[in-house]
Image: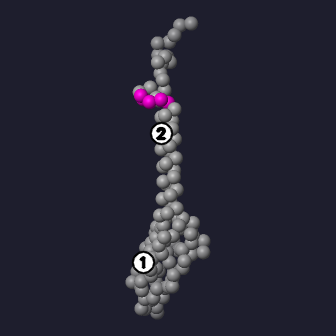
């Protein structure tokens, strides 16, 4: 059987990903696995101990204090509604244009965010 000139030949001296490393495979495996475990532990520690902040932009109304040190999965406590002369408070929203309402009973914390007040002008 004749070999085709374009066919790839297997490399006879290939020694895998460790061919240029001057330490044993076992030692390198421990270093890699240890590094991965350390990274996982740091991520878990960071998530567990780094609280999130929910800020409230009252858009001209009275100040509403931010809620800090919230953890992933917590619910945001509904604050006292702000007041603004000549306007009625109409709820908290995810966006400045007040198109996406925030529901304090169903939405959980998954990161720091700012909620925006919606106002309706009094007649």
Q: What element carries label 1?
A: strand
Q: Position of residue 38 (x, y in %)?
A: 49, 48
The residue under label 2 is 31
Q: Is mark 2 on a helix, strand or loop?
A: helix
* Near-viewer residue (22 or 97): 22
Is residue 14 rendered magenta in the image?
A: no
Q: Where is residue 53 in the image (x, y as percent from the top left)?
A: 46, 70
* Near-viewer residue (23 or 59): 23
> Would residue 26 be visible to someone looking at this image?
yes
Tell me which label, 1 or 2, sits earlier in the chain: 2
Residue displayed at 48% across by 34% down: 28
How many angstroms separate mark 1 from mark 2 (CA)? 48 Å
The residue under label 1 is 57
Question: Which picture quadrant has residue 72?
Answer: bottom right
Q: Which of marks 1 and 2 is in front?
A: 2
* Near-viewer residue (19 or 97): 19
Give the magenta-colored segment's residue range: 21-25
Is residue 23 rendered magenta in the image?
A: yes
Q: Position of residue 99 (x, y in %)?
A: 49, 73
Residue displayed at 51% across by 52% down: 41
Residue displayed at 48% across by 67% down: 51
| Contact (Cβ within 8 Å) of mark 1 with mark 2 | no
């Amino acid at each position: 059987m004749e070999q085709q000139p374009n066919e790839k030949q297997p490399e006879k001296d290939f020694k895998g990903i460790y061919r240029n490393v001057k330490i044993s495979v076992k030692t390198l495996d421990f270093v890699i696995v240890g590094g991965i475990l350390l990274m996982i532990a740091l991520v878990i520690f960071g998530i567990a101990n780094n609280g999130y902040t929910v800020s409230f932009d009252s858009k001209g109304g009275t100040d509403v204090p931010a809620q800090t040190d919230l953890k992933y999965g917590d619910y945001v406590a509904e604050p006292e509604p702000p007041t603004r002369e000549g306007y009625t408070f109409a709820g908290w929203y995810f966006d400045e244009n007040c198109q996406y309402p925030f529901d304090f009973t169903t939405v959980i914390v998954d990161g720091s965010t700012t909620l925006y007040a919606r106002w309706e002008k009094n007649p």
